[in-house]
Image: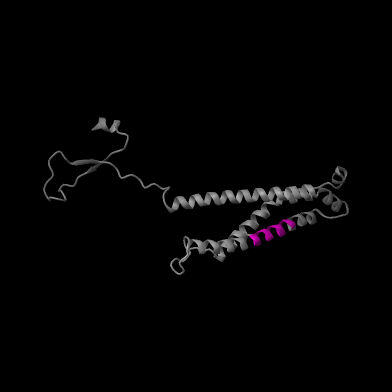
Amino acid sequence: MARSWLLAPERWVVVPKPFFSSRAGTLMEEGSCCACRRPTPPRRQFRGERFHLMLVSIFAALAALLAAVGIYGAIAFSVAQRTREFGLRMALGAMPAAIRRLTLGRTTRLTLTGAACGLAVSLVLGQLLQSALYPVPHQHSGLIYGVSIRDPLSLSAAAAIVLALAAIASLAPAGRAARVEPSAALRNE
């Protein structure tokens, strides 16, 4: 028994047998007080809904990261293109807070426009997908994990996340725009 334990790739568990057999109700034979059996394999944790939820969460986090990097790149490029304008405004007496507010205001306007367009497109595509996936009316509720295609809470949460990402991603370029030296900005061009 000990030798097979060392050579076996799986683990075995020694379980004591009851004094009376449950099937026959008789005394067990002397010397057979234990039975060896394989343990039940643990349930795999990466199956089913838990795995899908984790996979969707990873893709959502990657999408949010890519959106933040894209917004940062676009705003940084815009700030680099407008360096002369910011330098001129600073030379004429604009405060750094006003320059920062100007940059963040532009980011907010662009993000709100993009979020509104995205919500409109998602509603139209959601209606098209619902009619394509569920052609028989009243046979399926159109709910995926209890969330409808036009769920206002989900859509507003997505828009709020995009707005928050845009605000965070535009802080560094806005700060860079507010620290522009007027003389250096005007001399470069």
Give the color scheme: rainbow, by chain, secondary structure or one colour.
one colour
**Magenta segment, which residues?**
106-117
When the figure is inspected, residue 126 is found, relative to residue 59, above or below; the finding is below
Residue 29, position as x, y percentages in the image: 12, 42
* Residue in the foreground of this view, choosing between 27 and 173: 173
Locate residue 54, reporting x and y percent: 49, 50
Residue drawn 66% across and 49% down? Answer: 70
Q: Is residue 140 left or right of residue 109?
A: left
Quadrant, the C terminus: top right
**Is 111 one of the magenta-colored residues?**
yes
Which residue occupies 35% across, 45% down?
Answer: 42
**What is the quadrant of the N terminus in the image?**
top left
> What residue is at 74 percent from the left and 57 percent from the top?
106
Figure quadrant of residue 120: bottom right
Q: Residue at x 29, y 30 (%)?
A: 7
Q: Nearer the viewer, residue 37 or 145?
A: 145
Q: Is residue 22 left or right of residue 178?
A: left
Give residue 155's quadrant in the image: bottom right
Q: Nearer the viewer, residue 61 or 141?
A: 141
Q: Position of residue 187 (x, y in %)?
A: 88, 43
Give above or below for 135 relative to 31. below
Q: Is residue 135 above or below residue 183?
A: below
Q: Main secondary structure of the magenta part?
A: helix
Horizontal side of 178 relative to 45 (left or right) equals right
Residue that extends furthest to the bottom in the rendered view of this protein: 138
- The correct choice, above or below, for 174 with respect to 11 in the image is below
Q: Position of residue 65 (x, y in %)?
A: 61, 49
Is 5 magenta? The answer is: no
